[in-house]
Amino acid sequence: VILYRKLAVAALVAFLQAMNKSVQGLIALAMMLIFYHFQSTVKPFTTPGLNAMEVRSILTATITLYCGLLYVTESLNSASKVVLMLIIIAWNLYFLIYWLLHVFVAVRFMVRAKNPELYGRFCFPTFLAHKDKEL
């Protein structure tokens, strides 16, 4: 799914170079909405968390693209452009924090599965105490 999306965007850039940048952006926006629909309905990943992360990733790209298209229009005043830039920054920051939290949780699970002692020492200091009580 991700590969097809990236391939479609690369094809858009390669084959539609002669077109206006705004038209390219609108076509890319339509493609992102199609990929959002596909991701939301098919859910190609086996893990629900990965499907949710991919949906948020596509939404982040779509919002960034849409606000970017509005930003480059010449009919907006500077205050509107500042608002659009703040929306882009806020949404990308939201996704970055969401992604970092999920990466942190995944790393904790991997460390716990491979080395419980290391996990107990660094990730969750009371883990060993609970482990001893369970035995």
Image (tube, grey):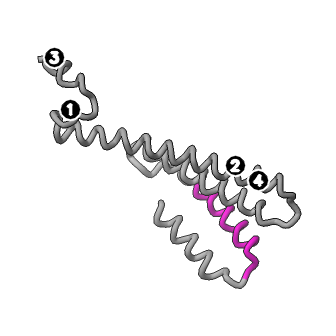
The residue identified by callout 3 is 134
Mark 3 to mark 1 CA distance (whole Å): 18 Å
Q: Which residues are magenta?
A: 19-36
- Report x, y in % for residue 23: 75, 72
Label 3 packing within 10 angstroms: few (<14), some (14-19), many (20+): few
Residue 108, quarter of picture: top left
Decide whether residue 29 is among the magenta residues.
yes
Earlier sequence position, callout 2 versus callout 4: 4
Secondary structure at numbered mark 2: helix
Q: Is residue 63 above or below residue 73?
A: above
- Report x, y in % for residue 77: 87, 58
Specify whether 58 is left or right of 16: left
Secondary structure at numbered mark 4: helix
**Mark identifier at residue 108:** none
Mark 4 to mark 3 CA distance (whole Å): 56 Å
**Mark identifier at residue 121:** 1
The residue sitting at 38% across, 45% down in the picture is 103
- Report x, y in % for residue 135: 11, 17
Residue 111, quarter of picture: top left
Earlier sequence position, callout 2 versus callout 3: 2
**Mark identifier at residue 82:** 4
Specify whether 3 is left or right of 105: right
Kind of residue sitting beneath label 4:
Val
The residue identified by callout 2 is 87
Kind of residue sitting beneath label 2:
Ile
Earlier sequence position, callout 4 versus callout 3: 4
